[in-house]
Amino acid sequence: MNSRTFDCTTESNVILDNNNNNYKLKLKRTTSMEEKKNLLSNIKMGTREWARREINCIKGCRMYCLYCYAKGIAKHYKRCTEETWKNMEINSRAVDKKYSKVRKKGSQPYDIMFPTSHNIILDEPYFSACTIVLKKLLEADNSVLVTVKPSLKVVKKLCKLFQDYKETMTYRFTIGSTSSRILKILEINAPTFEERLESLQYATVNGFNTSISIEPLLDSTPFKLIERLEPYLSPLNYERDIGTIWIGLLKTQYIPIALRTGEIKEFIKFIKPRLKFEHVYQYYEKLYNHPRIKWKESIIKMMILNDVKTQGITS
Ligand code: SF4
């Protein structure tokens, strides 16, 4: 592998460490194990952090991200293999059914997250299946978080089709690295960084609400990503979760052991030390008061376990 990929001498790839052991956000007291358990049990997990319901209409996903949680679950229940996950199959029941307004109560800012276990791609019949479902969800007056690894052509078409729903539809674009090379290693068939950035810019300029998911973070730190993405985001509305940037960690356990060779093996070697508290804390502290940043459960949990301030516990 070309060593440039994970060049530890560049600013974005250094391992952050706190030599002085000066943890400004450490709690004044140590929380008991019971308190920690309580706090951890109240954390919303995964998609539940964002929306009350999740809807999908395709089984499998051609993007083929190695770390994909949905793939891991489908494999566990023998619904697919590593190979067949890429073969997409439309779930006609999900496309044909009627959808109504979500009645479930919750603190999440969105009624529905769509999709959660596949991407929206331009190829037919998949694009039409997705837009039929999305239209029904929006027509039923749901607020919908459209979560994709965006290709520009898809975003352009979605913006055209759904221009009457700018108030209730928000894009959440997943962008975990500024390096298209790193994205290619982990998210085999997904769009490049440049295309995702252009998609973000397009959607925002065209008046849609946009937000970002840096989950999983595939760079050493999120600073460079934030610097590149922030100028193109919608104005911030923290309560409605618009213009926000969510940061979460890679869960390496979903990367199949059999695939951990060559570049993938090198990447895992690169990322592992960057998933440790000592490293994560350094950017957590620097970004703690950043108005757009929200932390995913993987980081919140880590901070609770290490007696560091989080939104739930601040003294
Ligand atoms: S785009 Fe999402 S659903 Fe598709 S493989 Fe990647 S992580 Fe899984």
Image (tube, helix red, strand yellow):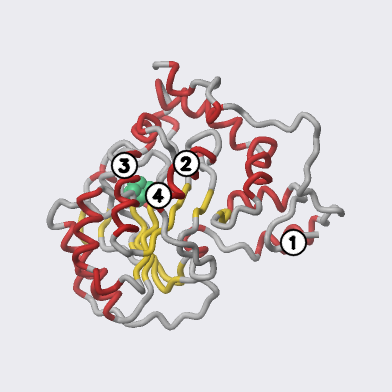
CA distance for labels 3 and 4: 14 Å
CA distance for labels 2 and 1: 28 Å
The residue carrying mark 2 is 225
Q: Amino acid at mark 3?
A: Tyr
Q: Is mark 1 within 8 Å of ligand 1?
A: no
Marks 4 & 2, CB-CB < 8 Å contact: no
Image point 47% across, 41% down: which residue?
225
The residue carrying mark 4 is 174
The N terminus, quarter of image? top left
Check the image and report above or below for 187 versus 126: above
Instruction: Indicate which disc residue 313 carries.
Output: 1
| In this rendering, the label closer to the viewer, 2 or 1 | 2
Whether residue 246 is visible, yes or no, is yes
SS assignment at label 4: strand
Which sits earlier in the primary sequence, circle 2 or circle 3? 3
Q: Is mark 4 within 8 Å of ligand 1?
A: yes
Which sits earlier in the primary sequence, circle 4 or circle 1? 4
Which sits earlier in the primary sequence, circle 1 or circle 3? 3
Specify the quadrant of the image occupied by residue 275: top right
Which sits earlier in the primary sequence, circle 3 or circle 4? 3
Whether residue 75 is visible, yes or no, is no
SS assignment at label 1: loop
Which sits earlier in the primary sequence, circle 2 or circle 1? 2
Check the image and report above or below for 70 versus 222: below
- Where residue 189 appears, x then y in whole percent? 27, 39
- Where residue 188 appears, x then y in whole percent? 31, 36
The residue carrying mark 3 is 64
